[in-house]
Amino acid sequence: MRRPIPCLFPFAMVTVAACVVEAGTLEVGPGRKYARPSEAIGAAKDGDVVEIDSAGSYGGDVATIRANRLTVRGVGACRVKLPAEGHHAGGKAIWIAAGDDITVENIEFIGPIPLTNHPKAEEAGNIVLQSVAEARLADPARYDYRLEAGSPAIDKGVEPGKAGEISLVPEFQYVHPAKGEKRPDDGKIDVGAYEFAKGK
Protein backbone atom coordinates (compact mmCIF):
# COMPACT_ATOMS: atom_id res chain seq x y z
CA MET A 1 0.00 0.00 0.00
CA ARG A 2 1.40 3.28 -1.05
CA ARG A 3 1.02 6.27 1.15
CA PRO A 4 0.50 9.70 -0.42
CA ILE A 5 3.56 11.83 -0.23
CA PRO A 6 2.70 15.29 1.04
CA CYS A 7 3.90 18.04 -1.21
CA LEU A 8 5.13 21.11 0.59
CA PHE A 9 5.37 24.35 -1.35
CA PRO A 10 7.39 26.84 0.59
CA PHE A 11 6.41 30.46 -0.08
CA ALA A 12 8.96 33.16 0.48
CA MET A 13 7.31 36.48 1.24
CA VAL A 14 9.55 39.37 0.48
CA THR A 15 8.59 42.77 1.82
CA VAL A 16 10.14 45.70 0.07
CA ALA A 17 10.17 48.84 2.13
CA ALA A 18 9.98 52.00 0.08
CA CYS A 19 11.92 54.88 1.48
CA VAL A 20 9.81 57.98 1.16
CA VAL A 21 11.31 61.25 2.27
CA GLU A 22 8.56 63.62 3.36
CA ALA A 23 8.92 67.34 3.04
CA GLY A 24 9.50 69.12 6.33
CA THR A 25 7.99 72.36 7.58
CA LEU A 26 10.39 74.83 9.18
CA GLU A 27 8.72 77.49 11.33
CA VAL A 28 10.12 81.00 11.77
CA GLY A 29 9.12 83.65 14.28
CA PRO A 30 8.72 84.46 17.97
CA GLY A 31 8.89 81.27 20.03
CA ARG A 32 9.58 79.12 16.94
CA LYS A 33 12.65 77.01 16.23
CA TYR A 34 14.07 79.62 13.88
CA ALA A 35 14.12 83.31 14.81
CA ARG A 36 14.99 84.62 11.33
CA PRO A 37 13.95 83.53 7.82
CA SER A 38 17.61 83.21 6.77
CA GLU A 39 18.18 80.57 9.46
CA ALA A 40 15.34 78.37 8.23
CA ILE A 41 16.23 78.92 4.57
CA GLY A 42 19.80 77.86 5.31
CA ALA A 43 18.60 74.68 7.04
CA ALA A 44 15.95 73.78 4.44
CA LYS A 45 16.24 70.68 2.26
CA ASP A 46 14.80 70.09 -1.21
CA GLY A 47 11.01 70.07 -1.14
CA ASP A 48 10.67 71.66 2.32
CA VAL A 49 8.26 74.41 3.34
CA VAL A 50 9.36 77.46 5.35
CA GLU A 51 6.55 79.26 7.20
CA ILE A 52 7.31 82.75 8.50
CA ASP A 53 5.10 84.23 11.23
CA SER A 54 4.02 87.78 10.40
CA ALA A 55 4.21 88.66 14.10
CA GLY A 56 8.02 88.69 13.90
CA SER A 57 10.38 91.48 12.91
CA TYR A 58 12.85 90.57 10.17
CA GLY A 59 14.41 93.84 9.05
CA GLY A 60 17.80 93.45 7.36
CA ASP A 61 17.54 89.66 7.17
CA VAL A 62 18.84 88.53 3.77
CA ALA A 63 19.40 85.02 2.44
CA THR A 64 20.56 82.77 -0.38
CA ILE A 65 18.07 80.00 -1.22
CA ARG A 66 19.96 76.87 -2.25
CA ALA A 67 17.25 74.20 -1.85
CA ASN A 68 15.15 73.13 -4.83
CA ARG A 69 11.34 72.92 -4.85
CA LEU A 70 11.26 75.11 -1.75
CA THR A 71 8.11 76.95 -0.69
CA VAL A 72 8.54 80.00 1.54
CA ARG A 73 5.29 81.51 2.77
CA GLY A 74 4.15 84.14 5.20
CA VAL A 75 1.56 83.06 7.76
CA GLY A 76 -0.36 84.94 10.42
CA ALA A 77 -2.66 87.91 10.67
CA CYS A 78 -1.02 89.98 7.92
CA ARG A 79 1.63 89.84 5.21
CA VAL A 80 5.23 89.25 6.30
CA LYS A 81 7.44 92.30 5.69
CA LEU A 82 11.12 92.01 4.78
CA PRO A 83 12.70 95.48 4.67
CA ALA A 84 16.26 95.42 3.34
CA GLU A 85 17.45 98.21 5.68
CA GLY A 86 20.60 98.58 3.59
CA HIS A 87 21.51 94.87 3.66
CA HIS A 88 21.77 92.49 0.73
CA ALA A 89 22.85 88.94 -0.05
CA GLY A 90 26.04 88.85 -2.07
CA GLY A 91 25.63 92.49 -3.03
CA LYS A 92 22.70 91.55 -5.27
CA ALA A 93 19.32 91.15 -3.59
CA ILE A 94 17.28 90.62 -0.42
CA TRP A 95 17.04 86.96 -1.39
CA ILE A 96 19.24 85.25 -3.95
CA ALA A 97 17.56 82.26 -5.60
CA ALA A 98 20.29 79.69 -6.30
CA GLY A 99 17.87 76.73 -6.29
CA ASP A 100 15.17 75.84 -8.81
CA ASP A 101 11.37 75.78 -8.62
CA ILE A 102 11.04 78.16 -5.68
CA THR A 103 7.65 79.49 -4.56
CA VAL A 104 7.32 82.61 -2.39
CA GLU A 105 3.90 83.52 -0.97
CA ASN A 106 2.52 86.39 1.13
CA ILE A 107 5.84 88.18 1.69
CA GLU A 108 6.46 91.87 1.05
CA PHE A 109 10.01 92.82 0.07
CA ILE A 110 10.91 96.45 0.79
CA GLY A 111 14.14 98.08 -0.31
CA PRO A 112 16.02 99.98 -3.02
CA ILE A 113 17.78 96.85 -4.35
CA PRO A 114 16.68 94.15 -6.84
CA LEU A 115 14.14 91.65 -5.52
CA THR A 116 16.11 88.64 -6.77
CA ASN A 117 18.94 87.66 -9.08
CA HIS A 118 17.18 84.58 -10.48
CA PRO A 119 17.67 84.50 -14.28
CA LYS A 120 14.02 83.53 -14.84
CA ALA A 121 12.63 86.37 -12.74
CA GLU A 122 11.09 89.28 -14.60
CA GLU A 123 11.33 92.63 -12.85
CA ALA A 124 9.84 94.68 -15.67
CA GLY A 125 6.38 95.83 -14.67
CA ASN A 126 7.25 95.70 -10.98
CA ILE A 127 7.89 98.74 -8.83
CA VAL A 128 10.46 98.67 -6.02
CA LEU A 129 9.56 101.16 -3.29
CA GLN A 130 11.02 102.15 0.05
CA SER A 131 7.72 101.63 1.87
CA VAL A 132 4.13 100.48 1.36
CA ALA A 133 2.97 104.07 1.86
CA GLU A 134 4.76 105.10 -1.34
CA ALA A 135 2.49 102.81 -3.37
CA ARG A 136 -0.53 105.04 -2.52
CA LEU A 137 -2.92 102.14 -1.86
CA ALA A 138 -6.41 102.84 -0.50
CA ASP A 139 -6.17 100.89 2.78
CA PRO A 140 -3.62 98.05 2.77
CA ALA A 141 -4.09 97.43 6.51
CA ARG A 142 -7.62 96.27 5.65
CA TYR A 143 -6.50 94.51 2.46
CA ASP A 144 -7.83 97.25 0.16
CA TYR A 145 -5.18 97.45 -2.53
CA ARG A 146 -6.99 99.77 -4.95
CA LEU A 147 -4.78 102.53 -6.28
CA GLU A 148 -5.23 106.12 -5.19
CA ALA A 149 -4.68 109.11 -7.46
CA GLY A 150 -0.96 109.79 -7.79
CA SER A 151 0.10 106.18 -7.23
CA PRO A 152 3.39 105.36 -9.01
CA ALA A 153 1.73 102.12 -10.20
CA ILE A 154 -0.68 103.92 -12.52
CA ASP A 155 0.07 103.25 -16.22
CA LYS A 156 3.34 101.45 -15.32
CA GLY A 157 2.20 97.95 -16.22
CA VAL A 158 3.72 95.88 -19.03
CA GLU A 159 1.76 94.26 -21.85
CA PRO A 160 1.71 90.56 -20.81
CA GLY A 161 1.26 89.18 -24.32
CA LYS A 162 -0.56 85.93 -25.10
CA ALA A 163 -0.61 82.25 -24.17
CA GLY A 164 -1.20 80.69 -27.54
CA GLU A 165 -4.19 82.63 -28.87
CA ILE A 166 -5.39 83.75 -25.42
CA SER A 167 -4.65 87.32 -24.35
CA LEU A 168 -3.19 87.63 -20.84
CA VAL A 169 -4.29 91.23 -20.39
CA PRO A 170 -6.39 91.29 -17.17
CA GLU A 171 -10.10 91.85 -17.85
CA PHE A 172 -11.56 91.47 -14.36
CA GLN A 173 -10.58 92.35 -10.80
CA TYR A 174 -11.61 91.14 -7.35
CA VAL A 175 -14.42 92.71 -5.34
CA HIS A 176 -14.62 91.74 -1.67
CA PRO A 177 -16.08 89.39 -0.64
CA ALA A 178 -15.79 86.69 -3.33
CA LYS A 179 -17.01 88.76 -6.28
CA GLY A 180 -15.55 90.35 -9.36
CA GLU A 181 -16.01 93.29 -11.68
CA LYS A 182 -14.90 94.35 -15.13
CA ARG A 183 -11.45 95.94 -14.93
CA PRO A 184 -11.40 99.52 -16.29
CA ASP A 185 -9.54 99.88 -19.58
CA ASP A 186 -8.03 103.21 -20.59
CA GLY A 187 -5.51 101.66 -22.95
CA LYS A 188 -2.70 101.55 -20.36
CA ILE A 189 -2.14 98.83 -17.76
CA ASP A 190 -1.53 99.65 -14.10
CA VAL A 191 0.78 97.60 -11.89
CA GLY A 192 -1.07 95.58 -9.27
CA ALA A 193 -4.34 93.79 -8.69
CA TYR A 194 -6.52 96.81 -9.51
CA GLU A 195 -6.77 99.32 -12.33
CA PHE A 196 -7.08 102.90 -11.13
CA ALA A 197 -10.46 104.46 -11.82
CA LYS A 198 -11.37 108.04 -10.93
CA GLY A 199 -14.18 108.34 -8.43
CA LYS A 200 -13.62 104.87 -6.91
Image: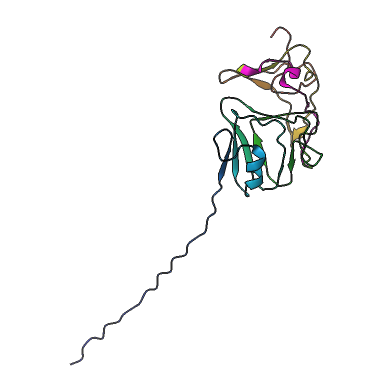
- Asked if 188 appears above or below 168 in the picture, the reply is above
Q: Residue at x 69, y 9 (%)?
A: 200
Q: Is residue 101 left or right of residue 122?
A: left
Residue at left 55%, top 37%? Answer: 32
Query: Which one is in front, 193 or 127?
Result: 127
Q: Position of residue 124 (x, y in %)?
A: 81, 31
Relative to 3, say whether 86 is above or below.
Answer: above
The picture places residue 73, in percent across and down from the top left corner, at: 62, 35
Q: Is residue 144 visible?
A: no
Q: Position of residue 141 (x, y in %)?
A: 63, 18
Q: Residue at x 75, y 36 (%)?
A: 94
The quarter of the displayed image where residue 39 is located = top right
Total residue callouts: 0
| Magenta region, residue range | 120-141
- Residue 140, percent across and down? 65, 18
* Magenta-drawn stretch contains 140: yes
The quarter of the displayed image where residue 198 is located? top right
Outermost left residue: 1
Q: Kindly identify the residue that appears in the image at 56 percent across and 25 percent down.
A: 77
For this view, does 67 lie left or right of residue 15? right
Task: Please say whether residue 98 is visible from this viewpoint.
Answer: yes
